[in-house]
Amino acid sequence: MATETLTLGKALNTGLRRALENDSKVVIMGEDVGKLGGVFRITDGLQKDFGDQRVIDTPLAESGIIGTAVGLAIRGYRPVCEIQFDGFVYPAYDQIVSQVAKMHYRSGGRLNIPMVIRIPFGGGIGAVEHHSESPEAYFAHTAGLKVVTCANPQDAYVMIQQAIASDDPIVFLEPKRRYWEKGQVDLDAPLSDAYPLHSARVVRPGTDVTVLAYGPMVRTCLEAATAAAEDGRELEVIDLRSLSPLDLSAAYESVKRTGRVVVVHEAPSNIGLGAELAARITEECFYSLESPVLRVTGFDTPYPAARVEEEYLPDLDRVLDAVDRTFGW
Amino acid sequence: MVLGRRFDTQATALTKQGRLAVYPSSRGQEACQVGAVLAVRDTDWVFPTYRESMALVARGIDPVDVLTLLRGDWHCGYDPTAVHTAPQCTPLATQCVHAAGLAHGEAYQGRDTVALAFIGDGATSEGDFHEGINFAAVFKAPVVYFVQNNRYAISVPLSRQTAAPSLAYKGVGYGVPSEQVDGNDPVAVLAVLTRAVEHARAGKGPFLVEAHTYRMEPHTNADDASRYRDGAEVDAWRDRDPVARLETYLRARGVLDDAAIAEIADQAEAYAADLRTRMHEQPVVDPLSLFDHVYAEPTPQLIEQREQVRAELAAAHDEEGDA
Ligand SMILES: Cc1ncc(C[n+]2csc(CCOP(=O)(O)OP(=O)(O)O)c2C)c(N)n1
Ligand SMILES: [Mg+2]
């Protein structure tokens, strides 16, 4: 096997397959995850190979999916729940926030909820309303939940397995518009040696401005970095990967060198992750900063109609514009 | 129904041409789509889902306005208060609760409005369906819950949604009179729904109708139905085609002849041609519209963000001019 070229979607599928093979307590649950393999085919072929007791087409009810998974988790199962689209997680919000997140705490640590909630998130696919949202802040704000997201096939393959192996409940956000992007995946490297799940990673070193991003925006920022380099500016791009807990050690180290930071996410800016990042960086790196921490984000509107989503989504130009503005202080 | 089908085929064609982002066809469900709206008055309120485009054009809403959502121009193209029709609903079953509230409020005002809530078989598994019908029952609100049981929720068959002998049992459990009907028989659908609407209008509370039907096309154009159902099953339902059945019925009763059929077909073609022409005009969508209507009273922060995009667009426009 060794190294193969896979799409991000196929890498997730392969990671899920590995998890099902390695641990008989892993079960996949969701709407259309069986014969159809999910609307994005992330569970393609898994029901055929592992049976309909391990890859379960549930009734159409998100609260039911997450709630029954809580019961399974109490008895040692590791449910991997698929929510079909970001905008359809809300019927399960009560179960996630009041039950999944708090069971370990309430039971004095006696009950673990080793659950993964997979959610395709973000826009850019020309969909109708409720299919393009970025709900990460709702979950990252909730104590008891961990939130991660992947930005490339290698991370997708490894992180989904790490999330399943974790004893804490994890909201696993998948950048749906990157499902079809390809990359090299090392299928043989043992999980125990893998880069830690809750660590950020420098994906492009640079000296002039630090750019923090995650999920679908990592690629956008890498493209911005390529463009900036042509103009003689070196951006250091950091893929946060874990949104809760946040690992900002690499960011602090970087900012102390560059003095300039741009934070990029698709979610609206108002009370979003960018605000938390800006606050922490300001607290930690105040004397190194040459400019305020700038945010490039979606606007404070509901996700717009497909025909104008291009104007909504942060793109290369907006990132470069913010980079320029960090030099204006 | 012929017009409705022609609309549906046209919408599917427009999707293939890239004019619509997505289209969930209701081919095969014409008796339900058209029958349901014929059973209510213009002043009654309809709560449709994404599946009900055909029902909405049958209700007389301009087809271009109906397709606004699926074209991706805006989230709803018609004025809900003008046509007494809620925006088409994508988060499943949420409309069931709204219908209960609206109907309750209307009754409280002494009006005899009925609310007609559409819902699919799969969506009856959602909590909001149960909460909606229970509220309506307890409030004795005039709602008709119309379940189009087309056997599938995307790929998931009915057997994965319920262990009850039929979905009508879900109404019975809440104390709501519930009936099943052959959803491919337009006359039966209209008769049963008319009775249900009369029941609600008479102040006797909600009513549930479960129509047994079948979606002939994939869930949407993006779906691959061959993964979960075979051609033989689809073919068996082809024999129960609601449009053909109505034609046979009316011919047998001597109220429809070849001339009338040709005339209806011509009307449908003209309707489709008009829709085609209007949909081929490239819609002008103002990018700044994304900032509209977030609040009744816009926030300063939003006004600032809108200004940022306006400036970006103006700068891009100037660059184009220079080039
Ligand atoms: C709350 C919620 N969960 C999931 C979805 C995704 N989804 C859209 S349609 C659909 C199937 C609905 O099936 P059914 O209720 O039978 O209606 P039909 O499409 O057959 O008309 C699903 C799962 C959604 N729209 N809303
Ligand atoms: Mg259905």
Image: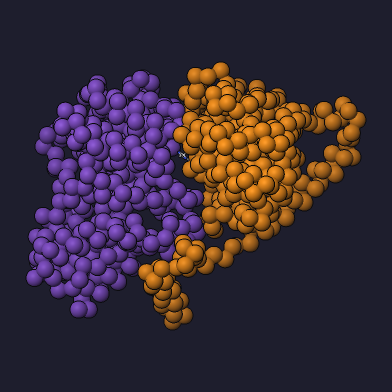
B296 up-or-down from B138: above or below: below
Query: Quarter holding the C terminus of chain A?
Result: bottom left
Residue A291, given in percent of the width and then of the height, sits at 18, 73
Q: Quadrant of residue B58?
A: top right
Left or right, B171 with reference to A14: right
Residue A3, given in percent of the width and then of the height, sits at 21, 38
The chain coloured orange is B
Q: What hue does chain A carry in this figure?
A: purple
Q: Residue placed at 33% from the left, 36% from the top?
A: A95
Report the colour scheme.
Answer: by chain
Q: Nearer the viewer, residue A287 or A177?
A: A287
Q: Nearer the viewer, residue B272 or A170?
A: A170
Q: Is residue A205 visible?
A: no
Residue B157, given in percent of the width and then of the height, sits at 51, 25
Q: Residue placed at 24% from the left, 68% from the top?
A: A294
Left or right, A124 with reference to B114: left
Q: Quadrant of residue A67?
A: top left
B106 up-or-down from B253: above or below: below
Q: Residue placed at 19% from the left, 31% from the top?
A: A107
Say how many tags the image has: 0
Q: Tell which residue pokes out farthest to the bottom in this image.
A: B322
Q: Residue placed at 63% from the left, 62% from the top?
A: B281
